[in-house]
Image (cartoon, rainbow, N blue to C red):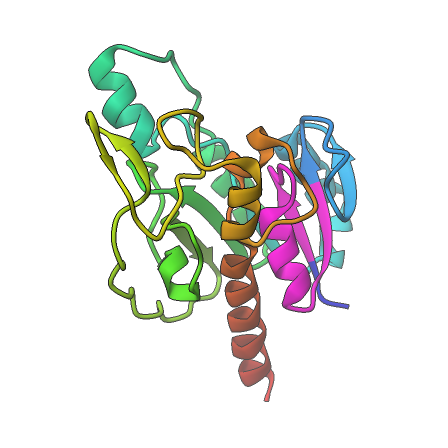
Amino acid sequence: MRRVLDLFSCAGGAGWGYHLAGFQVDGCDTADRPNYPFAYHRGDALEYLDHLTTTGDIDRYTLVHASPPCQAGCALTIGTNTSQGWGGTHRDLVAPTRELLERTGLPYVIEQPNGRAAIRKDLTLCGEMFGLGVIRHRNFELGRWNTPTPIHRRHRGYVRGHRHGTYRTGPYVASYGSGGGKATVPEMQTAMGITWTDVREELTEAIPPAYTRWIGHSFLTIRQEALA
């Protein structure tokens, strides 16, 4: 059975994409996530990964996906928030996550938004590549495997809403924050292809399942070719 461990899983945007690609999915996050659509372990993701690796239970997985908290390096934190003196100190979990993933000996994926997060940008995906109603650029570091990046299609216009005092209309909605023309919950659900949660906070943190469906299919194709 193809099985993926979905660390820092939030409500399951990444997990659902792997499910659509043919994986059995197990999630882990620190918060209670009653909307998570698969088997779920509530706890510290890094402690759980360390436990699975130490006991050998990690061997039941084919692939590990991790989306560690990204506030320390995301574009909003290092851009608008910093310039305005907003926000506080954020812990960067990318390096310890990578260290533990390397210990597993398994292929892995680390996901981060655009910004200064210290990951290799082996793969960059955008909603326009999949005909979605969001832009939502995301970078992925691929460990122990690789795949070509699809062509980054030209954006069709602006993201709807206020930006720097100007309101613009456009074919994409802003699936983060609230006010200023940001997307409603139903708009975010439709734009990202997420139907199993209507919690705004979960939607604003999610990545569209189309991204990990593409990643999952690419991984399985490359794996099958290697075994042939």
Q: Is residue 104 something that shows in the picture?
A: no
Q: Is residue 209 something that shows in the picture?
A: yes
In this view, 223 is above or below 195: below
Estimate the x, y position of residue 121 in percent, counting from the top left: 33, 53
Estimate the x, y position of residue 63 in percent, counting from the top left: 62, 58
In this view, 217 is above or below 155: below
In this view, 53 is above or below 201: below
Q: Which quadrant of the figure has residue 123?
A: bottom left
Name the residue at 56% across, 71% down. 217
In this view, 199 is above or below 189: above
Horizontal placement of 93 versus 159: left or right?
right
Name the residue at 40% across, 44% down. 173
Estimate the x, y position of residue 50 in percent, counting from the top left: 66, 37
Estimate the x, y position of residue 128 in percent, counting from the top left: 36, 60
Name the residue at 39% across, 39% down. 174
Horizontal placement of 201 versus 23: left or right?
left
Horizontal placement of 188 versus 81: left or right?
right
Instruction: Depth check: give the residue in front, 49 or 122.
Output: 122
**Which image quarter holds the N terminus?**
bottom right
Instruction: Depth check: give the residue in front, 209 or 192.
Output: 192
Horizontal placement of 56 versus 115: left or right?
right
Name the residue at 55% across, 78% down. 221
Q: Magenta segment, which residues?
A: 4-27
Indicate whether residue 227 is drawn in magenta: no
